[in-house]
Every structure is written in C-alpha cells, then in structure tokens.
C-alpha cells in the first residue's frame, strides 16, 4: 500500500471539498444536520488518519499541513471543516501522548484502517466553560473503567466512532487533576439534554449530552490532561480553528471575486470600484493566513521538545492567534458582503454569503475571546519579556 503524502491528501481534499462538501453545505446548514456526505468522503480519502505517524500507517502530517487541509475544506463548508479540525485535535492527544501503550498503538492502526471519527467531551454542567476543571471522575475497578458525565455540549458525539472524555483522575482527585478517557462506540450511551438550533455551525450538531461509558482500563490515558492540553489540544485547536475561519473567509471572498470579474467583463477597459475593495480584502486575508501559518511553523519546529509549550510566551502566542483570527475572519466576510451587495445578502443565489457570515461569527464564542483576553491580561502582569 502506497504511503499517502501531504501533496496527494491536499489535492484530494480540495477536490472533495468542492465536489461533495460544497454541494451539500447549504442543506447541512438549512437542516442543521450532520454532514454525512463530507465525513464519508473524508474517510474514503483517508483524511481522518492524516495525522497518525507513519509507523502506524498514517501520513504523519504536521500541524501546518493539517491546517492547510482544514482551510481548504472550510472554503466550501465550515461545519464539516470544524468536525475535521476537532477530530485532528483529539487525534493529537492520542498520537502525541499515548503511544507508549501497545494497545493504543494497535488502536491507531485500526483507526487508519477503519477511519474512525473522534469527538470530544470537555464541557460539563457546573464548570462554566472551564475545560481545565472537571466534576465527574473515572472509576477504575480491576481491568475496567466506568464514567458518567453531564456535558453542556457534545460536538457531533452522536455521530462519532469514539469520544475522548475529560474527567478527574479518581473520586479523591481535585478538580484540576484530570485525565482523558477513550470511549469507543458500543462502550457508551448518550442521553441528549438540549437542542442544537444555532445561528451558524449548524452541522456540527453539538447539543448537550449525559454520557455513561465503561470499557477496558487501558483506555484511561495515563498522562495528565494538563500536559496533553498544553502540548496538543490547545495548540492544535487554536491553529486549526484559525485556519478554518480563514478558509470560510476565503470562500466568501472567492464569491465576491467571481462577481467582480463578471462586472469587469460588462465594461471592458474599466476597473470596477469593487475591485479596489477586493484588493484590500485579499491583502487582509493574506495577513490572516500568514498569522496562523507562522504559529504552526514555529510549533512544528519544536519537534519532540515540548518544554516551551508550558511557558507563558507560548500560551500568549496561542491566545493571541485565537483572538485575532476570531476578530479578523468576520471582518473579511463582511468585506465580501460589502463587495457583493444585495447579491451576497440574498440566500437563493450563487453569490450568497449568509452561511459564511453566520458560521464565522462562532469564532469569538468558541472559548470566548473575553475569557482568553482575561487570561492573557493576568499573564502580562508578571511576564516582562514578551
């Protein structure tokens, strides 16, 4: 079997995002349904195992390369790109923190073969959005674990092949002493506790759930969630989110560019005033793209040396990327709307950007910018060299 490469996976991702995700994006949004067609296409192309190291059958793609795939997919469908980005973030917690266990190595090989989709359950009733705090605890008895959790959101959990659940290490552990538990399909039951009727990102299907899970004790990851969060979940989430938000903006500006070119063809020799607006927007898009690419490249350059990822400097770097990307993307989609005018405002035409607009507004709410800025402010009170 030929080892997949970034070039081959990126090419197929661009093609499938247009041929599959783009075709179904409007219906996914209108029906607030899971993007089954897109995820099936991802599985068929082997995209779900792109981050698995080569020794276990994956392509071993870097964070920068994964971000490029997410950005390309998001230009066609923000919801399915978000599912892919969140899957990659969870996969990183396994590939970067659990590979010393031969049973988890075997699971990763199985994931490559069967293209499992991973979801996460980090929220919880009573923690008020603080992912580094848990109320529930895992109970390990002999060779099995049991866990019950009441989560405020469970992104696409009802459609996932496995869920990574945050919880306290045991019943006596403090709320910050957390671990991740891998619960596979057939090992958990879900009781939906709320609805997912949202302004945007409707296809991520993220209502609240109560989950009960049990399985082999080896599926309780031995590493502290504090480490996997700082070294993998936060870096991957913020970079991949920034990339896909930029991808959504790119998709909107592509529609604007199509309209501008059509206008130019009607008046040969004249440059439409909207072309000047487009030039400024594309410059802003390029600046946003360079922002996440720089952080991803610096992260990849660290290699196996993860010590720096626990410093305030790196925490600020990820915080600033998330906040600035979440601010920039809606402005870019708004610029696309101003270029398009009524063509972009109407939902029933080829230049509609309403879905893009609504999807990208979620950026400042996914771990709220205000919460992140507060943390950054606290760090800057003591960090002198930034």
Image (cartoon, helix red, strand yellow):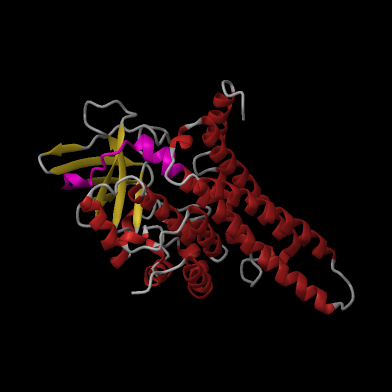
Q: Is residue 226 magenta?
A: yes
What residue lies at 22% left-to-right and 37% top-to-bottom? 138
User: Which quarter of the rendering shows the C terminus?
Assistant: top right
Give the x, y percent position of residue 259. Answer: 73, 71
What residue lies at 42% left-to-right and 50% top-to-bottom? 89
Give the x, y percent position of residue 327. Answer: 63, 45
Question: Magenta segment, which residues?
Answer: 213-234
User: Which quarter of the rendering shows the N terminus?
Assistant: bottom left
What residue lies at 31% left-to-right and 47% top-to-bottom? 164
Give the x, y percent position of residue 51. Answer: 40, 58
Q: Is residue 356 magenta?
A: no
Is 71 on the left or on the right of 188, as rendered? right
Q: Is residue 164 above or below residue 46?
A: above
* Location of residue 246 by image quarter: bottom right
Closer to us: 366 or 194: 366
* Location of residue 257 by image quarter: bottom right
* Location of residue 146 by image quarter: top left
Q: Is any atom of residue 99 visible in this view?
A: yes
Is 47 on the left or on the right of 375, as rendered? left
Q: Is residue 31 above or below residue 206?
A: below
Q: Is any atom of residue 116 visible in this view?
A: no
Number of numbered tags placed on the structure image: 0
Closer to us: 220 or 102: 102
Give the x, y percent position of residue 44. Answer: 37, 72
């Amino acid at each position: 079997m030929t080892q997949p490469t970034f070039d081959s996976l990126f090419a197929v991702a661009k093609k499938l995002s247009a041929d599959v995700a783009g075709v179904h994006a409007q219906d996914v949004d209108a029906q607030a349904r899971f993007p089954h067609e897109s995820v099936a296409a991802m599985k068929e192309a082997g995209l779900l195992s792109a981050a698995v190291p080569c020794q276990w059958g994956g392509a071993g793609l870097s964070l920068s390369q994964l971000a490029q795939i997410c950005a390309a997919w998001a230009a066609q469908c923000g919801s399915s790109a978000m599912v892919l980005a969140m899957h990659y973030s969870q996969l990183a917690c396994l590939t970067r923190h659990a590979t010393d266990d031969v049973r988890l190595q075997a699971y990763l090989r199985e994931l490559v073969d069967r293209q499992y989709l991973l979801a996460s359950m980090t929220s919880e009733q009573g923690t008020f959005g603080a992912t580094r705090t848990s109320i529930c605890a895992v109970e390990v008895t002999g060779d099995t674990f049991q866990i019950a959790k009441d989560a405020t959101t469970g992104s696409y959990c009802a459609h996932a092949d496995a869920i990574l659940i945050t919880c306290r290490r045991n019943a006596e552990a403090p709320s910050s002493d957390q671990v991740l538990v891998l619960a596979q399909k057939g090992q958990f039951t879900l009781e939906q506790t709320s609805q997912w009727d949202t302004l945007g990102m409707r296809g991520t299907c993220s209502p609240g759930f109560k989950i009960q899970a049990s399985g082999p004790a080896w599926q309780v990851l031995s590493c502290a969630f504090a480490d996997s969060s700082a070294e993998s979940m936060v870096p991957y989430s913020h970079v991949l989110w920034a990339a896909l938000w930029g991808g959504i903006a790119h998709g909107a500006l592509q529609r604007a560019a199509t309209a501008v070119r059509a206008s130019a063809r009607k008046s040969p020799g004249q440059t439409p005033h909207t072309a000047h607006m487009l030039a400024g927007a594309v410059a802003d898009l390029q600046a946003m793209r360079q922002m996440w690419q720089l952080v991803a490249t610096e992260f990849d350059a660290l290699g196996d040396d993860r010590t720096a990822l626990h410093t305030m400097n790196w925490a600020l770097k990820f915080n600033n990327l998330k906040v600035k990307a979440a601010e920039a993307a809606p402005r870019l989609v708004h610029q696309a709307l101003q270029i398009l005018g009524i063509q972009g405002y109407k939902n029933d035409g080829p230049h509609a950007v309403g879905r893009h607009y609504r999807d990208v507004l979620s950026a400042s709410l996914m771990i709220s910018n205000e919460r992140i800025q507060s943390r950054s402010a606290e760090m800057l009170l003591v960090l002198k060299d930034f």
